[in-house]
Image (cartoon, rainbow, N blue to C red):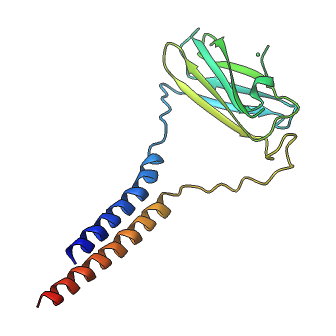
């Protein structure tokens, strides 16, 4: 009977570990460092083939700023004079007030979420702006709507608690039966 208890306890521990690994994997969001009064805005035509202007502030005067665009067919986009999710990066110089802006002409087959990140090469200031063209297929509008699952931490914690509770009940029952059989 002891052998069964050990096996059962091992299974409970393995189950708890299998639930804990995915939980730990999503627990830490990537940091976005900012210094000073960093700010950003995005305006324009949020459609495939449209042009958007993304403005950033908070960089050091005349600082070189790396600006990257990530999204569907981003390599086909034109950033100010620059198949699936791609990234394109250009470098611009902030003005005397620490501001930089880029005009982005989106490709005709653009869809989904685009992220524009500006990073000061000297200050390390990183500012991100995101905009959504909607859709889920080339040309937009043809795919399923993005419903967003949200944060699943509560689900993982609840499931893990249920597994641990169930395992504890099974182990306690096995121990109790083992002790009754000894008497």
Q: Is residue 71 above or below residue 76?
A: below
Q: Nearer the viewer, residue 178 or 95?
A: 178
Asked whether, in this view, residue 136 is left or right of residue 159, the answer is right
Residue 77 can be seen in this image = no
Q: Give how far across and how far down residue 69 sits, in percent.
A: 69, 26
Asked whether, in this view, residue 100 is left or right of residue 10, the answer is right
Q: Residue at x 82, y 44 (%)?
A: 137
Q: Residue at x 75, y 34 (%)?
A: 84
Quadrant housing residue 51: top right
Q: Give how far across and how far down residue 76 sits, in percent.
A: 81, 24
Q: Give how far across and how far down residue 113 sits, in percent.
A: 72, 40
Q: Is residue 157 above or below residue 59?
A: below
Asked whether, in this view, residue 29 is left or right of residue 113, the answer is left
Residue 152 can be seen in this image = yes
Quarter holding the N terminus?
bottom left
Q: Is residue 1 above or below residue 82?
A: below
Q: Residue at x 48, y 41 (%)?
A: 29
Q: Give how far across and how far down residue 168 sits, in percent.
A: 30, 74
Q: Nearer the viewer, residue 60 or 155?
A: 155
Quarter holding the C terminus?
bottom left
């Amino acid at each position: 009977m002891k052998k069964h208890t050990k096996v059962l306890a091992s299974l409970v521990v393995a189950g708890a570990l299998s639930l804990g690994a995915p939980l730990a994997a999503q627990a830490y969001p990537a940091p976005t460092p900012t210094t000073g009064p960093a700010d950003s805005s995005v305006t324009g035509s949020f459609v495939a083939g449209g042009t958007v202007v993304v403005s950033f502030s908070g960089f050091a005067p005349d600082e070189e700023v790396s600006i990257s665009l990530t999204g569907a067919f981003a390599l086909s986009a034109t950033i100010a004079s620059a198949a699936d999710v791609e990234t394109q990066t250009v470098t611009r110089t902030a003005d005397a007030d620490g501001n930089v802006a880029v005009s982005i002409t989106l490709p005709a087959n653009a869809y989904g979420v685009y992220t524009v990140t500006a990073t000061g090469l000297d200050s390390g200031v990183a500012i991100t702006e995101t905009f959504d063209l909607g859709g889920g297929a080339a040309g937009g509008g043809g795919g399923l709507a993005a419903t967003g699952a949200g944060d699943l931490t509560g689900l993982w914690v609840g499931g893990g608690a249920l597994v641990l509770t169930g395992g504890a009940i099974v182990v306690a029952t096995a121990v109790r039966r083992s002790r009754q059989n000894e008497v």
